[in-house]
Image: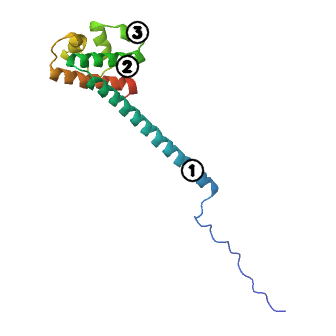
Amino acid sequence: MTGLVLRDIHEPPAPGWWPPAPGWWLLAVLLLGVVAGLCWWLRRRRLHRRRLERMFDDAVDAAATPAAAVAAISELLRRAARGRDPAADALDGEAWLRFLDRDARQPAFGGEEGRLLLAGGYRREVDPQRLEALRTIARARFLQWTTGRP
């Protein structure tokens, strides 16, 4: 009888890394979905902010006189304030200016711009530089209130 040649036990080769297991495909699809959803949400938020910026600018630019521009700014701020507090549109004078500065990092309506906002719609002459300063701070407050971000 001839001797049988016995071979040692050998293991099969390790599996390759490609193609990945179904769990990895599922994880990749979920991750891609989350990234796509986040991009869609951020784009939508940015477009909403741009629409609000355009609405504010168009309303102020449509005013025939500087006094009418101050009145338009006041109306836009009051509209935005109603979203924060339904009773805010009934405020006037110093109470209105305090409301505008409430929760602000830096109070902006306590000075000349605030006085212009209160009485500028009734003036014959409005200083264009003061109007531009009022427009800048009012636009920032309007956007903060309507978008929830500064």
Q: Residue furthest right?
A: 1
Above or below — where is 129 with respect to 4? above
Q: Quadrant of the N terminus?
A: bottom right
Q: Quadrant of the C terminus?
A: top left
The residue sitting at 29% across, 18% down in the picture is 72
| Circle 3 SS class | loop
Residue wearing tag 1: 29
Q: Earlier in the sequence, mark 3 or mark 2?
A: 2
- Gap in angstroms between the C-alphas marked 3 and 1: 48 Å
Q: Earlier in the sequence, mark 3 or mark 1?
A: 1
Q: Residue furthest bottom?
A: 1
Q: Amino acid at mark 2?
A: Ala
Left or right: where 20 falls relative to 129: right
Left or right: where 40 falls relative to 73: right
| Circle 1 SS class | helix
Number of the front mark, 3 or 1: 3
Give the number of callouts: 3
Residue wearing tag 2: 80
* Number of residues whose C-alpha sits closer than 10 Å to that of mark 1, classed few (under 14), some (14–19) or many (20 or more): few
The residue sitting at 18% across, 11% down in the picture is 123
| Res. 102 visible in picture | no
Q: Amino acid at mark 3?
A: Ala
* Number of residues whose C-alpha sits closer than 10 Å to that of mark 3, classed few (under 14), some (14–19) or many (20 or more): few
| Display coloring | rainbow
